[in-house]
Image (cartoon, rainbow, N blue to C red):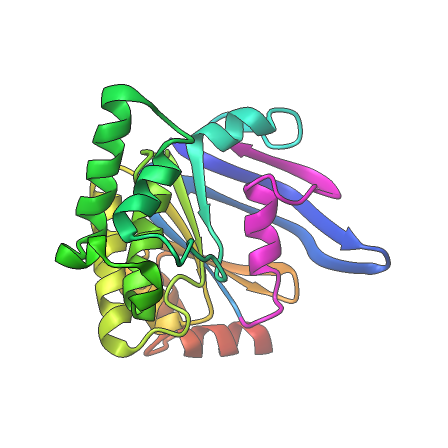
């Protein structure tokens, strides 16, 4: 079953067309990667899916809801973590989780959500330290936990390991794997093709606003007789 379907999606800014009629779908429970170089249209696409940008034309359905006409329903079933997301640095991690959970629930459900978020962040005693004392990796773990503690149907993450060192990037990928195992569909963008090869069930490669390839990483590497997805991308662009 498809939880996300894009058909001939376009986004223009005046004369400039940033997204040029793209199509892809994401199945329930999979980790799907939208990959390509900076400026290729990844973030614009994620923002349209997340109802933050209006489509110029085409259609996007999220769990059966059209983003253009049922934006409120879409927002109830997704979470979106942008690349530049931040937290209230004067709060402790626990206080931040409680503050954010208050937008979604109260009573027992509120406490359950906070507990889930703290468990996902896995920060130990540092959950009671102020966020402005966290490393970038710790802050990213907190933000990912915040994004999924409300049990969204789809978690949308933009360049989720950008700027992290090797260990923190590895730990972040483990969190994403666990989120998917818990039944959440994950849509992530990245220009790190090693990362999506490690994580994703299927990918769509985007270049200059167009989808140029879609498929499982192993299948694409076999089709292009390539050792890695970077090589696949280069061969596909060159035609």
Q: Give whichever of 162, 191 is nearer the camera.
A: 162
Q: Is residue 156 above or below residue 200?
A: above
The image quarter in which residue 154 lies: top left
User: Is residue 222 at least partly visible in the picture?
Assistant: no
Q: Is residue 129 left or right of residue 85?
A: left
Measured from the top left, where is residue 39 in percent x and y? 62, 69
Q: Is residue 43 above or below residue 68?
A: below
**Residue 222 falls within the magenta-colored stretch:** no
Residue that extends furthest to the left in the rendered view of this protein: 124
Q: Give whichever of 65, 219 is nearer the camera.
A: 65
Residue that extends furthest to the right in the rendered view of this protein: 15
Quadrant placement of the N terminus? top left
Which residue is at a point 46% across and 28% down the rendered structure image?
A: 76
Q: Give whichever of 178, 110 is nearer the camera.
A: 110
Measured from the top left, where is residue 221 in percent x and y? 36, 69
Q: Is residue 4 left or right of residue 115?
A: right
Q: Which residues are magenta?
A: 37-62
Quadrant placement of the C terminus? bottom right
Measured from the top left, where is residue 57 in percent x and y? 74, 41
**Residue 46 falls within the magenta-colored stretch:** yes
Measured from the top left, where is residue 207 in percent x and y? 60, 67
Q: Is residue 16 left or right of residue 210?
A: right
The image quarter in which residue 134 lies: bottom left
Which residue is at a point 39% across and 28% down the rendered structure image?
A: 104
Which residue is at a point 52% across and 68% down the rendered structure image?
A: 36
Residue that extends furthest to the front in the rendered view of this protein: 90
User: Is residue 64 at least partly visible in the picture?
Assistant: yes
């Amino acid at each position: 079953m498809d939880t996300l379907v894009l058909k001939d999606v376009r986004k223009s800014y005046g004369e400039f067309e940033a997204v040029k009629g793209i199509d892809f779908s994401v199945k329930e429970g999979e980790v799907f990667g939208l990959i390509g170089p900076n400026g290729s249209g990844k973030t614009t696409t994620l923002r349209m899916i997340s109802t933050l940008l209006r489509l110029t034309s085409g259609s996007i359905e999220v769990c059966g809801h059209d983003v253009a006409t049922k934006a409120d329903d879409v927002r109830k079933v997704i979470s979106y973590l942008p690349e530049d997301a931040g937290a209230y640095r004067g709060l402790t991690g626990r206080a931040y989780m409680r503050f954010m959970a208050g937008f979604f629930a109260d009573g027992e459900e509120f406490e359950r959500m906070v507990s889930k978020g703290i468990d996902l962040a896995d920060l130990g005693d540092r959950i009671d330290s102020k966020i402005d004392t966290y490393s970038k990796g710790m802050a990213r773990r907190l933000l990912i936990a915040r994004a999924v503690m409300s049990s969204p149907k789809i978690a949308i993450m933009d360049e989720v390991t950008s700027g992290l060192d090797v260990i923190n990037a590895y730990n972040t990928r483990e969190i994403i794997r666990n989120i998917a195992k818990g039944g959440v569909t994950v849509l992530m963008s990245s220009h790190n093709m090693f990362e999506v090869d490690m994580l994703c069930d299927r990918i769509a490669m985007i270049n200059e606003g167009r989808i140029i390839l879609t498929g499982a990483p192993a299948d694409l590497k076999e089709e292009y007789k390539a050792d890695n997805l970077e090589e696949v991308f280069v061969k596909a662009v060159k035609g």
